[in-house]
Image (cartoon, rainbow, N blue to C red):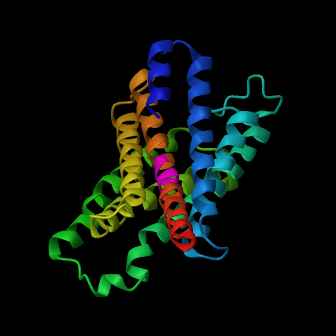
Amino acid sequence: MILFVVVYLLAGPDSASVVAGCILAAKLFTLISFVLAASRFSLGDRLFVAWWLLASNMTLLLLKDLFLGQSVDVVGTGFSIEEQSFAVGAMLSMANIASTIAMIMLARAWPDSGLEAVATPSPRQRLLKLAVVPLAVLVFFLAMRENMHHLPPDLLRTIMLVVIPNVADLVCLSLIGPIALTAFWLRGGALSWPWALLALGNAFWLVWDLATSMSHLTGVAAEVLRLLALGYTGSAGLEQWWLLRRDSDSETRTGLA
């Protein structure tokens, strides 16, 4: 993650190919991390499904970037505007739906485990769950206001390119509180780290959304925020894989002793 940021800063904001390469490398790192995390769970487990949904999200975003570009420009893609915008819309819709379901499952991991009944949230902790929601709603309305100026010509592409991505952002950003609270409840143990890193990664996405929407932030600062968001969410998957691999190795060594 730090390497991507350093390479980008050294290359400078005018090196478009290096910028695109850093973003693709960060997404590939994140995808591999999610797959590794999912591989430590049994088929059908809640967290197996959640990490694979996140991997599906990143796979679709990578395919979009590789074959359709990181923007909706049609230069050099070989597709017409209509073809590309439909393909981008379909990929973004599926990716956002997958990530939204995954984040809901990860945010519900602690309550659905039954342990929340043992450690009843205090009023302050309940407030933390909702603390980020106003900012998430602000991001939603800013993005919708911006999109209203250049809506696609038909309803289907409007839903795929505007409605689904923005609603997905609203839900995922609103879940920063519950995910951070899960990390808080698991504090004192290594298991808190995946949730803490996920919350931090989503927090950087929130800052990126606010900065690009309110101040139209571009260039170095915007890309660094995006790299940090990808890096921390990817690190969450890597940490989940490492923790469970370490525990598995420890059990194996104990059994052989």
50 or 235: nearer the eye? Answer: 235
Is residue 168 depicted above or below 153 in this figure? Answer: below
Q: Horizontally, is 142 left or right of 34 in the view?
A: left
Is 144 in front, or is 47?
47
Residue 153 at x, y percent in the picture = 67, 45
The secondary structure that most of the magenta stretch takes on is helix
At 47% from the left and 35% from the top, the residue drawn is 1
Residue at left 66%, top 56%?
56
Q: Is residue 93 magenta?
A: no
Depth order, front residue of 147/84: 84
Q: Compared to 116, does 239 lie above or below? A: above
Q: Is residue 248 left or right of residue 184?
A: right
Residue at figure coordinates x 35%, y 36% from the top left? 211
Spot the residue most to the front. 257
| Res. 61 image quadrant | top right
Query: Residue 234, image x and y in percent?
Result: 51, 47
Q: Position of residue 178 (x, y in %)?
A: 34, 67
Q: Magenta stretch?
A: 235-239
- Height in image: 157 above or below 123? above
Within the image, what quadrant is residue 78 found in?
Answer: top right
Task: Residue lying at the far right in this picture: please name it.
Answer: 78
Along the line of sight, the residue nearer the viewer: 131 or 163? 131
Asked if one can make out residue 187 in the rendered structure from this viewpoint, the answer is yes
